[in-house]
Image: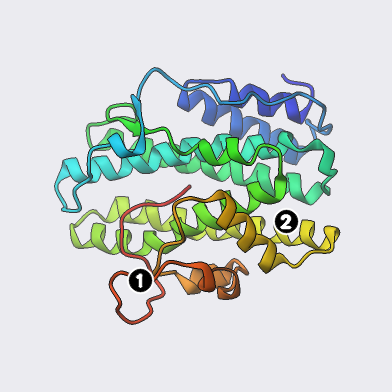
Amino acid sequence: MVATLSEAAVAVLTTAAPMEKVRLTREYAAAWRGGALAEIGGAVPPDRPARPERPELKLPRDMPKRGRGGTLQNRIALLHALAHIELNAIDLAWDIVCRFPGEAMPRGFTDDWIAVADDEARHFAMLEHRLNQMGASYGDLPAHDGLWQAAQKTAQDLTARLALVPMVLEARGLDVTPDTVRRLRAFGDDESAGILQTIHDEEIGHVAAGHRWFSHLCRRRGVDPVATWQDLVLRNFRGGLKRPFNVTSRAAAGFGPEFYESIAAPDPAAGPTSSEGSDGGSSS
């Protein structure tokens, strides 16, 4: 058994096998909640987490296009892409736990991100189990290697990490998942739809944690949260904020439109404002 929480984080980050990463995460999260792990410690996280030999990792531009139809292969490709996101999300949560010791964050910060890691581990396991039911498994298809770039870009700045990962990438998941759930139900795949609905609902809390601790840091530094977030996003996020936004779910996370509306790209559909997204996927 590891002696400190940072040692636990490093153990997860340096574990390549996905289901072992899930097992360790759930074990260490329970140990932290129960008091068996009580000290943060000073172990330093690796620059990149360990990854299994499969899936093959490609640049985002080299990834094959996913179909939006209801065929088995299209649904497998969707769930595989989401499982890859959730696996990265496990590592992102553990990384933030031990990456920024100089910030001296309150105990609640650590509690929140360990809870996020535990959620992400459960989400990955749910998706892997569903893939297995469909005759597939994580690693069968290629995946893109762009997800860790946000972590590397923000490795020196906790405010930037919070601005980009939960408040851009996970918030995007809130935008796009409801439409994916509707399409899966229309295809008759209620089981996959139910998994994605659970992920969406629980990740409202992840966005809320990002917003809460970003705002905490801004207050501590005496800067305006909205202006600071917009500056960090414009400087660090090359993809641009895509409409439409799931305003309802974002609001449930305490993340209001005053943050994102004024810097978002125009909606290419030029239709009425919608509270839910339209392409298929979640961000963690």
Question: Left of 77 or right of it: where is 73?
Answer: left
What residue is at 85 percent from the left and 43 percent from the top?
104
Q: Is residue 67 above or below residue 220?
A: above
Residue 11, by quadrant, is top right
Disc 1 marks a residue whose amino acid type is: Asp
Q: Is residue 19 visible?
A: yes
Residue 181 point in image, percent of width and height: 32, 60
Nearest the viewer among 35 and 49 is: 49
Badge 1: how crowded within 10 Å, few (<14), some, or many (20+)?
few
Residue 211 point in image, percent of width and height: 66, 61
How far apart in space, not on screen, are marks 2 and 1 (Cα)? Answer: 30 Å
Residue 82, by quadrant, is top left
Which of discs 2 and 1 lies nearer the camera? The answer is 1
If you read the primary sequence from the N terminus, does the residue marked by circle 2 or circle 1 appear first? 2
Disc 2 marks a residue whose amino acid type is: Trp
Q: Is residue 175 above or below residue 1?
A: below
What residue is at 55 percent from the left and 42 percent from the top?
150
Q: Residue furthest bottom?
A: 272
Q: Quadrant of the N terminus?
A: top right
Residue 6 point in image, percent of width and height: 74, 28
Nearest the viewer among 194 and 140 is: 140
Q: Is residue 206 visible?
A: no
Residue on which disc 2 sits: 213
Question: Left of 154 or right of it: where is 36?
Answer: right
Nearest the viewer among 273 and 93 is: 273
Q: Secondary structure at mark 1?
A: loop
Badge 2: how crowded within 10 Å, few (<14), some, or many (20+)?
many
Q: Secondary structure at mark 2?
A: helix
The reply to whether dot 2 and dot 1 touch (C-beta < 8 Å) is no
Residue on which disc 1 sits: 267
